[in-house]
Amino acid sequence: MNSILETPILKVKLWGEQQLLINYILQTDLTNQKEVKNYSTLNFFIAAKNRKILINETNWLDKFGTATRKHAADHGFCAYAKATYENGFQLHFVIVSIDKNKLGSAYYNIQNLENSKKLLVNNQGF
């Protein structure tokens, strides 16, 4: 992994592992990491028990650096939160609410991602 990216990705991983609200965090832009400059956008997918908490309270975005801009919105099916940091990085999060007991379809086939390098956080213990 590019050393420039290690710090923000590690911060997201460590934060997510400590959150009871979070089911999973996946990094969704792994193919673009070879040509990283001093600024970059990193994209993540968060499956949470209640996405409204992450949208209404955006202070969690400050855990990854000093944010100069933050924005969050809910569009019904999914929501997003994004922040720009003083070091030039932007972090974008697509957020959905899921119930582990209702995952029967292939749409949220998270179990197949357990061995994936994209899976940063698995708080469900499959």
Image (spheres, helix red, strand yellow):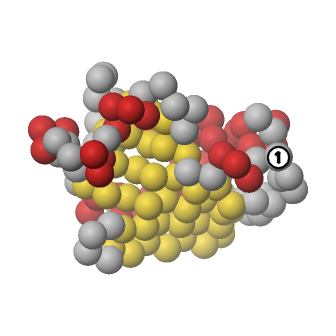
Quarter of the image with the N terminus in it: top right
In this view, the residue in front, 86 or 42, is 42
In this view, the residue in front, 100 or 70, is 100
Residue occupying image coordinates x 82% and y 36%:
3
Image spot of residue 47 (x, y percent): 34, 48
47 lies above or below 3: below
Q: Quadrant of residue 41?
A: bottom right
Is 21 situated left or right of 3 in this image?
left
Residue 20 seen in render: yes
Residue occupying image coordinates x 33% and y 74%:
74
Residue occupying image coordinates x 48% and y 25%:
115
In this view, the residue in front, 114 or 69, is 114
Q: Amino acid at mark 1?
A: Lys
Q: Which residue is mark 1?
A: 34
Image spot of residue 49 (x, y percent): 23, 47
Q: Residue furthest front?
A: 106
Residue occupying image coordinates x 62% and y 35%:
10
Q: Quadrant of residue 24?
A: top left
Quarter of the image with the C terminus in it: top left
Q: Secondary structure at mark 1?
A: loop
Q: Residue furthest top?
A: 125
Image spot of residue 81 (x, y percent): 46, 65
